[in-house]
Amino acid sequence: MTKLGLYLAQKSVNKAEAARKTGLTKARMNELTLNERSHLRAEELYLIALAIGVNPCELLEALYKNLNLKSGV
């Protein structure tokens, strides 16, 4: 399961309902939540955040808070 999948599960989000609200297919939503190799596009993240009623920045931070800048570059 991906970080997005875990986040949605923790929030008890119905993926089919979120897919319907965003216009994403159920297949794409499943790919984003189950396949680690899938790449979440910015517009998808934004639409998902709106669909589940969270601030897009909150979702972005929850999914990518482990990223850090390289030091000494």
Image: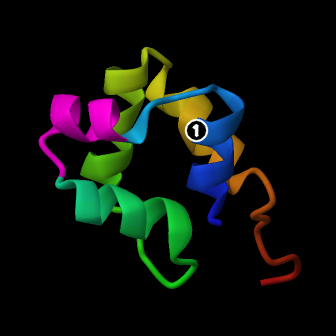
Residue 58 position (above or below residue 55): below
Vertical relation: 47 (above or below) 54: below
Q: Position of residue 6 (x, y in %)?
A: 68, 49
Q: Is residue 70 positioned above or below 52 on the image?
A: below
* Residue 47 visible (yes or no): no
- Give the residue drawn at x 56%, y 36%: 59
Q: Residues within 10 Å of mark 1 (few under 14, many from 20)?
A: some
Q: Quadrant of the N terminus?
A: bottom right
* Residue that lies at the very extreme toward the top in this rendered image: 53
Q: Which residue is mark 1?
A: 8
Magenta: predominant secondary structure element? helix
56 on left or right of 44: right
The reply to whether residue 19 is visible in this rendering is: yes
Q: Residue at x 36, y 36 (%)?
A: 48
Q: Nearer the viewer, residue 68 or 30?
A: 30
Q: Position of residue 66 (x, y in %)?
A: 81, 59
x then y, percent, for residue 61: 66, 41
In the rendered image, which quarter contains the C terminus?
bottom right
**Amino acid under disc 1:** Leu
Q: Which residues are magenta?
A: 16-24
Q: The residue tagged with tag 1: helix, strand or loop?
A: helix
Instruction: Out of 3 and 27, give the one closest to the viewer.
Output: 27
Left or right of residue 7: residue 52: left
